[in-house]
Amino acid sequence: MLAVHLVSFYFAKLKEDPTKKVDRFLHAMRLHDDQLSDISTRFQAEMKKGLSAESNVAAAVRMLPTHVRSTPDGSEKGQFLALDLGGSKFKVLRVKVREGMGIRKGGVEMEERTYPIPKEKLSGRGTELFDHVSQSLKDFLQKKNISLEKKHPLAFTFSFPCEHHTLDQGLLLNWSKNFRARCLQGKDVVQALKEAIDRTGDMNIEVLAMVNDTVATMMTCGFDDQYCEIGLIIGTGTNACYMEDMRHVDLVEGDEGRMCVNTEWGAFGDDGALNDYITEFDRDVDAASINPGKQTFEKMVSGMYLGELVRLVVLKMAKLGLLFDGCVSNELRTKGKITTAHVAAMEEYKCGLKNTRDILTDLDLNPSPDDCIAVQHVSTIVSFRSSNLVAAGLAAILTRIKKNRCLRALRITVGVDGTVYKTHPQYPKRLHKVVRRLLPECHVRFVLSDSGSSKGAALVTAVAQRLASQKRQVDDSLSPFRLSQEQLQLVKAKMRAGLEAGLKSKGSSAIKMLPSFVCHTPDGTEYGKYLALDLGGTNFRVLLVNFKGGLQSSTRLYHKIYTIPLEIMQGTGEELFDHIAECISDFLDYMGMKNTRVPTGFTFSFPCEQTAIDTGTLVSWTKGFKATDCEGHDVVNMLREAIKRLNEFDLDIVAVVNDTVGTMMSCAYEDPECEIGLIAGTGSNVCYMEELRNIEKTEQKGGKTEGDKMCINTEWGGLGDDGSLDDIITPYDTEVNQNSINPGKQRFEKLTSGMYLGEVVRQVLLDLTRGGLLFRGHVTEALKTPGIFQTKYLSQIESDRLALLQVRSILQQLGLDTTCDDSIIVKEVCGAVSRRAAQLCGAGMAAVADKIRENRGLDHLNITVGVDGALYKLHPHFSRILRETTGALAPQCKVTFMPSEEGSGKGAALITAVARKTQEM
């Protein structure tokens, strides 16, 4: 008693300000911003734990994947039935989603009927509960004159924690909100509903989706606001969901796109994470609940408990003599006598104090004006703590989204539903203010859900149908790129036939099979200094290579790169070769070797007819070169003439080679089994060591010797120029070919090389956009611009380490405003185009390897391919698919791919060294 008198005496001094005694009494509930930031940080840690496969089972915050992968884009349409089960009543609805003319222009029409759930069903058998739901559904169909025979898609809002494995499946984890139906926990509630519908009979219902009310709220608001990616419920219960990057959702396979995660944040603190913020009143509420130790956060926040928290505080203060002169009525002692509706009424702006007096009077109390002020302030502190805690949770979600997307600022909308948010006069304003104070860099808009979870469930179903339809149409567009084993075997056979035909002296062949007059690969004894010139694209390289004779690691290489301007590439032949001579002069000056006549190899990466190793007549330009008066001329002579005109140095040009041959020679210096060269870059080509007896195009001095070999530059890019590949040519390839500088030529190269893959992708994206499947159907000027989608973007977009946010960033740099769904489709298109390219190269390589094996009469061949080119080296999947395809189509060959170091330049120097050594023997 002495303690009670001392407390009464102490607080009597504060009688002039009733709110101060409440502030002191409830100081633990008055949370400042540092505490809220701390709580937010703790919740972020709990979210991370719940998302991880390793810690999810033990996590208090379950972070349940919902399999909802997209928010509405306004193009959804259809008619759906919807069930909304989550409280003492449930609703059956007919929802019509009408497609609009533009984004967010569609509309939703709804008819609904509410059905009560008898109390005995809440705690009876699960079958009885769902039979009641199913019978009510049938009643709705009959009352609305909806056909029972016709098949109706149904969306199911089920507002209890469930573990989803698919969108139309959900295992009940636990009941809440006074539901206790037996024999359902751990069972699939969608299956339970389907079985009940079957028992009821005479209905044709297809349950397409089951979602939580929080998810449905987000989807409802998302239909009208494209930035809505968070759903929030603050009502009888509380929960939040948001769109999480798939790469962080361990419980679902795949890392493309986003998925809505149902946090089930009501359980935050069940593991003790909030113990230092829990008051004695929270512990009393928990102890008297039907689930002690569970839903800790929800019991501090939600409408089911706020009134009871206020009652317990007022009761304690009254017992201590701080209210009502120490009088305590039986009504005040009775659980549930102060509700959340009372809390809202007490905080009304104008008549809050009157409402407070009326509520207290109804509790058989005789409050003074100061008592009314104090009790109203208790209500304010309890509800303010609720909005503060919700703000801290939201701040955690917003921070996570912002970090996921690497943004400094975030614009986002939160869809909200729930009686506390809707009916409490001060709650929304307080919540918004605290969120913005905690995260000033985030522009957060709160939108109240219209028709809430029922409409949202129908929209989830509509979105799922839209995505499924979209996927089918995208798959149809990409199906021609997906080559079967039979098609690849056919390409291999056509390549083999082309190789054989190209070796003949008579008849025409799309594959040129040009002799290189390179008859030996390096043996490691090469010695001396050699100059190498490398022309094959927009850059020209000059190299000085110093071989040490058997000491590969001691080889020294010096080089400079020079640009070939477009006006030179497409000017006259004399201008081109004069520019090359000036570059060589600069390099020799740089190296101090202008007075030395260095043996030189010339890598010339264009189709040439050769009659000797140091002559090469240009057959045709490729790769954007169009210099006049070059085709049909010996490029070595043209270079020699340019050097004479400059008159500053002289060169001993020993060999002219293709870059593919140079690549093979470079790798053969390291690996004696290397007898094939492959370029997979701007262009596409292969060379290999062919038996001299099979080459009818050339006559060697001394005749053909059995077993002697010569490297053949296949120029395989011409495969298909005769129409042999028409059965795998897509309309997109046709468009690229027609718009190229050489229509009808290099058809295989246009399917496989870096110069064209980006343009093929652009044509596909253009077609999908025109069909309304990409970029909201908006064809931008950027998308209509040839060449804007460079092949390097394929490598970047397909990188496994690249998040979709970065994919979107690449596309936005190209002037393409994308959604997450757009980014997934673009990535799929890039993958289909690049995969086909790698498979076609693999089919061609299998033909070459099998030909070498059969030439040599072997059952099994071990051989190495020297490879160069950005597509092979930089694309994340090209090399693997190439290896796999080659292995599958040439099972009797073990083909090893060896990336070339310093490739064709070093190879040209080696050819020169080998040729010199051969001449000296």
Image (cartoon, grey):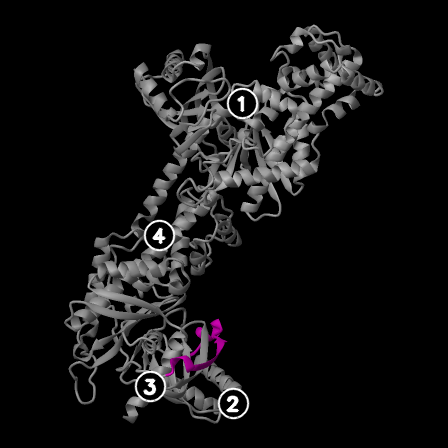
Specify which label sits upstream in the sequence, 2 or 4: 2
Q: Amino acid at mark 3?
A: Thr
Quarter where residue 430 is shown: top right
Residue most toward the front?
2
Distance in Å between CA atoms under marks 3 and 1:
83 Å
Distance in Å between CA atoms under marks 4 and 3:
45 Å
The label nearer to you, 3 versus 1, is: 1
The label nearer to you, 4 versus 3, is: 3
Element at label 1:
loop
| Residue that numbered label 1 is attached to | 292
Q: Amino acid at mark 4?
A: Ala
Q: Amino acid at mark 2?
A: Gly
| Residue that numbered label 2 is attached to | 592
Residue at the image position 52 percent from the left and 23 percent from the top: 451
Specify which label sits upstream in the sequence, 3 or 2: 3
- Whether residue 30 appears in this view of the structure is yes
Specify which label sits upstream in the sequence, 4 or 3: 3
Residue at the image position 53 percent from the left and 54 percent from the top: 813
In the image, residue 429 sits, relative to residue 551, either above or below, namely: above
Element at label 4:
helix
| Nearest to the observer: residue 174 or residue 576 | 174
x, y (%) of residue 166? 38, 34
Specify which label sits upstream in the sequence, 1 or 2: 1
Q: Which residues are magenta?
A: 551-574
| Residue that numbered label 4 is attached to | 832
Q: Which mark is residue 525?
A: 3
Q: Which mark is residue 63?
A: none
Q: Amino acid at mark 1?
A: Pro
In the image, residue 694 sits, relative to residue 463, either above or below, namely: below
The 10 Å Cα crowd at callout 2, few under 14, some 14 to 19, many 20 or more, is: few
The 10 Å Cα crowd at callout 1, few under 14, some 14 to 19, many 20 or more, is: some
Element at label 2:
loop
